Amino acid sequence: MIRGIRDDGRVTGIRTPSRAVVGTAAMIGPLLAVAACGADDGSAEASGEEGQVLHYWSMWQDSEPDAQYLQEAIDEFETETGITVEVEWHGRDVMNKVLAAQNTDSVPDVVTQSTSKVGSVMVNTDQYTDLSSLYEQEVFGEDVTIGEVINEDYEVVTTTESGEPFLVPFFVHAYALWYDANRLNEVAASPPETWDDFAQILEETRSSGQSPLALDGDIGSYASIWPGMTLARILGPGGLLELATDPSGEGWEDPAIRDAMVEIGELAASGYFPDGYDASKWPTVQRQWFDGEADFLLMGSWVPLEGDTKGWAPEDFELAAMNFPAFGDDRSVPFEAYGFAIPKKAKNVDAAEQFIAFMLNKDTLSTWANAVPVLPARTDLEQAGSLEGIYTIMQDNQLTPLLDGLRQYHPDYYSKIFEPAGRDLMLGELSGEEFIAHIKEQQANYWELNQ
Amino acid sequence: MTLLHERRDAPTRSVPPERRGSPVDVMRRRMFWPFVAPATALFVVFFVGPTIGVIWISLNEWAGAGPMSWRGLKNYVTLVQDPTFQTAFSNSMKILVLVGGCVFLASFALTAALREMKGKRLARSIIFFPVLVSGIVIALVWGILFQHGGTVNSVLGNFGVEPISWLNSSNMFTMIGLGMVWINVGLYTTIILAGVDRIPIYLYEEASLAGANAWQRFRYVTLPLSRDVVSVAAVLWTIESIKIFEFIFAFGGTTNDMPPTSVWNSALFVYGESFGSSAYRFGYASASALLMLLVFTAFVVLLRRLTHREPLEF
Amino acid sequence: MKGQDVATTGRNTARAHRHTVANFVKKAPRSLVWLLVAANIAVLVFMVLASFKTSGEIFDSPWSLPEEWNLDNWTEAWVTSGFGQAARNTVIVVAAASVSVIALSAPAAYVLSRSQSRMASGLTVAFVMGIGIPSQVLVIPIFVMLAEVGLVNSLPGLYFVYTALGLPFSVFLLTGFFRSLPSELEEAALLDGAGPLRTFFRVMLPLARSGIITALTLTILSLWNETLMALVLLQETANYTLSVALLAFLSTVQYGSGSYGALLAGACIVVLPTLAVYIWLGRRLIEGISLGSGK
């Protein structure tokens, strides 16, 4: 059926089945008509005789608040430019759809997702557009270029290996320890900076019978941030990526790593997390944390959204963020960037670029970001409210991609080796020592099998 | 699977061979293709074609778009050494053998009870129902019932029982297995009961007269005489067990994450390596799907060989 | 009963022991039956009750009646979370596909059951083998194929896939069914000059009515719950089927004011139609399964 691949990467020889499909369709025509009429209303087929039409595929579902506020900005864009925007609200799996579409001629003009998802689907398959010239363009209604308002720290994850930008960041999630400043006012007054200070606070809390830490153990990615952040602290920016891609796995034998992993593993073994955190369904433990049953939550900056917009936080809950404590001198803040990218086969690149330039406008972006609330990707926007704390931390420190971009560059390694091992460590299934031995062996094996 | 079929045709041939050249037969031959072609066309497009396609993809490395690069049998060589695949493989086998064993044991127990019971029909209908319910719904309810602060623990708490960690890493797969037994037991009870119902009553009456108790009647009458239906049911279970996906996917997975690799089965491995964790390794995923299909096909053939013998007439 | 009599007449311990064993063997399965029956009913009742409750109530008093029967959860699931749209999509695709499955498989099964040619038996075997090919093997090439013709993320695309997926089992079941029908009537009709089409529609179809209803029901129920294909092939919310909508809802209870109550209301929307079909056609279904697996 699939006989070969043409130069442009498309699979050829598929026409046979399609004719058969059509043939079959003719035989059962009336039924097809029934199926078709139920399908059509949602999809955005190009009709655009009058004016340009921009096809935008979104990472949100239309029921989410993010989408509703974004729709307002899109409406504004339509009145300002006369371009019609056909939005498809795909939700988080949008890139699966883009992947499919890349085999055909009907791709969207612009998409939103994280750098890692866009990277796997568009960069790995060479289906991205180089956005260098877009970075040189001015933001809509301002005298600054897009490149000037985007934090340079994001560049690591928004460019390809050869240095071409493939994504313009729109917002970011930064990772930190979150707590209720109202209840933990001593911590709020002087947040612990080193791991030892932090460990002491945790120990005091634990002996008083309160759970110092919260974690929904059923979510592997939440659990594996713990060893991930710790390793980033010890090895500095870029160090974790190097460690993980070392084919021998010998790097794990570093005594500093060993000590830290033992320490982190102890958290699970000695009951720092609430009872049953390893046998609950998200968001049970996170809700418990909002209710004051645990003190600290290591999480991305969507916590304010959950606390405020979804109303999980009680009235007197004062959300505060604290940088993950240092094991040495590294104080960098991990982030994940989300933004706009343009597929290679996009038909309306010009409109797509206008759209991106419009969305990055100071007022547009800050209105949207404050409403959600979420951290905008522009460096020159002040933050207030529940995001103020994390914003200050970001300004005071270097920003590094979460887990050094491991999930973006090696999704398979991440999901089969790093995340499961990290989860086992944080659920007390593996001690620190066992974790090292396990991941070292698995890693060596993995790179041997996958070059 | 082919063998599933062979026995049913022989005795009930409706057209005697001597009538082959009759006008009826000519007419039948003329209507053969018009009647069979549409179904066959669709079957070729969606089963035969993709199966050939999957074989081709499995010999390449491919990210779902863009260029393919030839890997020959390398994907397969890598697979058998991949610990995640080994886990998924052994989980599939555990589901096939252990969960299957429990399903059949429970089905026999239920059959034994149902056969001589009042309210048999009603009970059977109710036990049957879960197999018709979406695996996702069952996973969802199962999760709410068994999570640490869930319904089961809160009910047990009323009796002073400490909360039990039903869903931690070490219990997770067992709970998945239990869930699958619960879902499937009704279907297999129904199938086995159907076979058992065909056993003539007089055999049981004779056994009773000879002084056999319920267990002995089951052991010496029911069991040997339902052998055929059990072997069909075993093949069905083999075919169905490799397809299990939704229940594990929804039960172990959360937000936007796959379930932990320790509970992946074959179907989850395919999904995880392709779409699930953004790895988009379509060649590798295809190879794993084919390899698993091969093993299970061998299993079906073996199963038929083992249980094959002359049909019993009674 | 007889076994029990034998045992109770004995007085020595061995016999008493055998008595308890016999008793156990007899009682254990029966209690298992009732335990399962009770559990199944309990779970269903729990689900329906919970769909009217707040999250707090679900965990604090799982078995009590809801404090007030309000429909908020149902409205949320149906409107906000798109189950209404998903239900419409599912009904249309599953109904169209199931009817097509029968429309394609009944004639095929009929001639396959009546022909003895090598081609016929080869095809029959091929269809039966199709039952054994799991979706995960087919999903990637089908995805590629549909992407090429622009049928990914489209309900018509899913309709074709579902029609194809339902075929092998339906052909298998109906071939067996047609075989069990006597051929005299049909031969008489053919010899009377009724023509193959007329014979099939006027004579054979009415005879095969119960088999066809069974095949239709089984097809509907299995497609209704299909997940893997829909998950891979559909991406846009507006195209979701109930399975995908439920998965999406499950993973996004956090959006909006989502709660376990609404989630369970969504689950009810998925399950209750199956329950209705089951109550309506269940007896035939169980007969069909017995028929398909027996012999």
Image: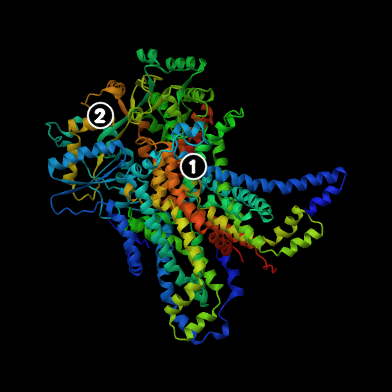
In the picture shown, does residue B155 fall above or below A398? below
Task: Find numbered disc 2 in the image and state the secondary structure of the residue it sits on.
Answer: helix
Type of amino acid under label 1: Met
**Residue sitting at 36 percent across and 42 percent down?**
C81
Cα separation, mark 1 vs mark 2, equals: 38 Å
Disc 1 designates what residue? C47
CB-based contact (under 8 Å), mark 1 and mark 2: no
Left or right: residue A12 versus residue C266 is: left
Residue B225 horizontal/vertical position (percent)? 70, 62
Left or right for A399, reference C232: left
User: Closer to the camera, C176 or A190?
Assistant: C176
Query: Is there any visible trace of residue C236 in the rendered image?
Result: no
Circle 2 chain: A
Q: Which residue sits at x=39%, y=52%?
A: C230
Q: Dot 1: few (<14), some (14–19), or many (≥20) neighbours within 10 Å?
A: many
Q: Camera-side residue: A266 or C262?
A: C262
The outermost residue toward the right is: C12
Quadrant of the drawing holding the C terminus of chain B: bottom right
